[in-house]
Amino acid sequence: MTNQQSHPLAGQPLELADTLRSGNAWKIRLACGYMGLPITRRTFDIVKGDLEADAFAQINPWRQVPALLTPEGVWLAESQAILWYLGQGTRWLPEDLLAQAQVLSWLSFEQTQHMHAFAQPRLLIHLRQTAHVDAPEMAAWRVIGMKAAALMDAHLAGRRFLVGEAATIADIALYPYTSMAEQGGYDLSAFTHITAWLARMRALPGFTPLMETA
Ligand SMILES: N[C@@H](CCC(=O)N[C@@H](CS)C(=O)NCC(=O)O)C(=O)O
């Protein structure tokens, strides 16, 4: 198990292309905070069209944040790939191959069953304020998200973290949008195991809030 001092990337430059309130980019800032890695932010504005600019295609031709500029000088896209890159050689990505595969299961779960159902209502209700919390489309997202939350809650019963005894990049991946669910009109208070897990994540050394002033 590698501690913060001996992270394989310690002392090397890392730059993150993000937006101010991106939950996907927050995953990377959380990871760097937990792992003791300083990171420089290059913050873009989606509303101003920054991601559509020609220059941004050099960072990520898929025109999304986050992207990480690695010490090799490569822009790496997709939050889960970046978490995997940062986690390698540390206790945040277990060496055991089955545990690694279980981490990957949760990374896939987040992208296919969880993230959009939480991110979309948050974006439209809270950030852009173009949808009402009770709009049928928002309620439809919440039906999907509540199913994902129920699955997480059942899994977390009797467990401290999603895989194994210690937090992994799987927990980091699921934290941002679960923790901001209320901004999309969700009430997750009945999911007591999720509530306790969120508190455990916040209590870990190096926790980084979404906004520095929060
Ligand atoms: N699968 C991607 C999703 C990234 C994503 O949806 N990023 C949002 C910000 S949170 C974005 O860049 N949206 C701009 C757009 O899609 O036009 C990941 O996990 O990194």
Image: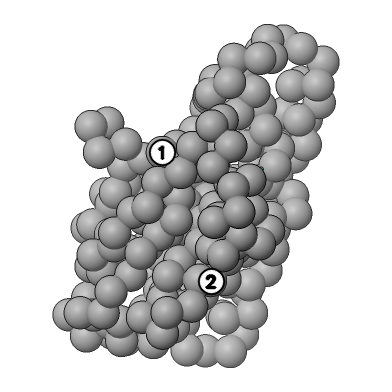
Can residue 2 be seen here?
A: yes
Q: Is residue 102 left or right of residue 208?
A: right
Secondary structure under tag 1 reads: loop
Residue 206 horizontal/vertical position (percent)? 23, 57
The first of marks 2 and 1 along the sequence is 1
* Mark 1 crowdedness (10 Å alpha carbons): few <14, some 14-19, many ≥20: some
- Describe the colour scheme in one phrase: one colour
Identify the amino acid type marked 2: Leu
> Residue 110 in the image: x percent, y percent?
65, 54
The amino acid type of the residue labelled 1 equals: Leu
Q: Nearer the viewer, residue 60 or 167?
A: 60
Q: CA distance from mark 2 to mark 1?
A: 19 Å
Query: In which image quadrant can residue 77 be found?
Result: bottom right
In percent of width and height, residue 15 lies at 35, 64
Picture residue at 56% right of the left edge, 30% below the top: 47
x 74%, y 40%: residue: 147
How many numbered tags mark residues here?
Answer: 2
> Which residue occupies the extreme front position in the image?
54
Residue 191 marker: none
Q: Is residue 122 above or below residue 201?
A: above
Q: Which residue is mark 2?
A: 76
Q: Are marks 2 and 1 in contact (CB under 8 Å)?
A: no
Is residue 213 or residue 188 the one in the foreground? 213
The x and y percentages for residue 79 are: 55, 61
Q: Residues within 10 Å of mark 2 (few under 14, many from 20)?
A: some
Q: Quadrant of the C terminus?
A: top left
Query: In this figure, which residue is indicated by the disc labeled 1?
Result: 20
Q: Is residue 188 visible?
A: no
Image quadrant containing the N terminus: bottom left
